[in-house]
Image (cartoon, grey):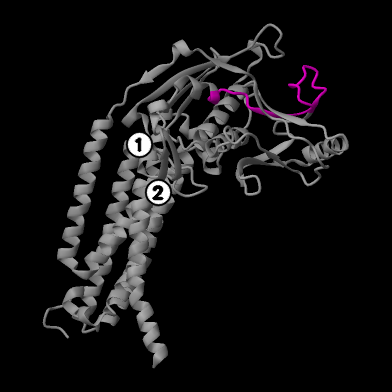
Amino acid sequence: MKRKRKTKGAKKLTFFIVAILIFVFAYTSFFGVDNYYGDNRTVYVKGAEDITWGIDIRGGVEAIFEPNLDANSDIKLDDITQADMDSIKEVMEARLLAKGITESEVRTDVNNKQVIVRFPWQSGDENFDPAAAVKELGNTAVLTFCEGSEAPAADKSNIVLQGASDIASAAPGYDRESGGYIVQLELTKNGSSKFATATSKLASSKGVISIWLEGSDSYICAPTVNEAITDGKAIISGDASVFTADYVNELASIINAGSIPFSLKADDNKLQIISPTLGTQALNVMTIAGIAAFIVICIVMIIMFRLPGVVTSIALLGQVAGMLACSSGFFDGVTGVTLTIPGIAGIILSIGMGVDANVIASERIREEFRKGKTIDGAISAGFDNSFNAVLDGNVTVFIVSAVMMGAFGTTDTFMGKIFSPVMQFFGSSVTGSIYSFGYTLLIGVIFNMIMGVYFSRAMLRSISRFKFLRKPWLYGGAKNAK
């Protein structure tokens, strides 16, 4: 008997545990977790404030890149091919995507050897420097390890490792021993062999290997070699004032995005500021309207379905919080998305699907009461009978969303390669906007299944365990039912 009471008590707590988790998740996804020290803001968890808004909402920047070739360059203007221009486009798209900017427009003009790039203002844009952002975008970004503290020599005699042939990947990290942020490198087989030879040579004399980001004339650091490194791994670290969380994330993304085949230049005088088609004021109006609509939906659901309506309102809050969290970069490893007007439409449509899923379940529960089922039987049968209908609708939308993200995303993905011959007939602005729509719709479907199906079921079953709430009319049954 004691075991049964403990089990029943644990099931009662489920409602409160799930509800509290959803409320905490909603608060942190809306407001984030940050700290201000003077004018400096340290972000621990990103919130709605950190969402990058599209050009149609906040405006953006347009830059024109041209080859930066001098008389001594190995590459001549006439030598630049369509393949070179396509390579530049892919690298720039990858760099923008690594920053969570999905509504970018990258076009190539092969005849004039130009690359035209449009991208939205970054979130928290009070200190946003368009010229610096454009310069970073056009960096050749070839990571180079050199023996000694001197810059890469013209004859490459002091170069130990260089570029993608030696460096396979980069990832931001944190070194607990030193208490600083680092970039972790994985070397290729060829790079591992060369690095092992160089470090074995320098270890005996305590020599240094300097690290440079060629193309941006950027010296990074020059660590001392204390022992041979033969495992194909390397770490880039430096002064804590420089190696911040944002810096190592940015450096790793640039390295992973690849290198541009030749140096580019963008004339600051040709930078154009793009005016938003909607505007920040309209965004504020949409936000207020969205909150009002959400409150109205919750009230209607509670009036119509009583306790299932209360549970639905909590689940919908979790679903909205999940979509905002995935858009802002709340989760580690999820860079977020540039939220455009179509992206907002995807959120609204997903909320509608979430309401629909809970309405179907609530109506099924009512039907079970009409058949004479008990409260426990009606809840179990109602969710079971509604699951297939909800699943079918969500799977269909999931597939459509995945195809949209693949077709309208960057061309280096599997789906992007399949649809690239077709997508060249559409403009870049179209592709970025629809990618945002597909992304929010896909995330909405996932959280609809998590919140609207599994969490709703768990909360409703839990709340039905309370004796004073075991009245069929509270779940949609008749008032005179027992």
Q: Give, as a single range, the part of the protein colored magenta.
A: 136-159
Report whether residue 388 is seen. Answer: no
Which of the 4 image quarters holds residue 453?
bottom left
Alpha carbon of mark 1 to alpha carbon of mark 2: how far? 15 Å
Residue position for label 2: 325
- Crowding at dot 1, Cα within 10 Å, few <14 / some 14-19 / many 20+, comes out as many
Which residue extends farthest left?
480
173 w.r.t. 341: above or below: below
Q: Secondary structure at mark 2?
A: helix
To which quarter of the image does residue 482 belong?
Answer: bottom left
Q: Which residue is disc 1 drawn over?
A: 340
Q: Position of residue 339 (x, y in %)?
A: 37, 38
Is 289 in front, or is 357? 289
Left or right? Give the position of 411 relative to 50: right
Is 269 situated left or right of 75 in this image? Answer: left
Say which residue appears at 20% left-offset and 55% top-offset: 297
Residue 380 quadrant: bottom left
Q: State yes or no: residue 154 in magenta.
A: yes
Q: 304 or 5: nearer the eye?
A: 5
Q: Relative to 146, does residue 10 appear above or below in the rendering?
A: below
Is 477 left or right of 451, judged from the image as shown? left
What is the x, y in percent for residue 26? 34, 54
Percent x, y for residue 180?
A: 61, 42
State the mark number for residue 11.
Answer: none
Would residue 376 be found to the left or right of residue 38 on screen?
A: left
Kind of residue at badge 1: Thr
Disc on the earlier residue, 1 or 2 = 2
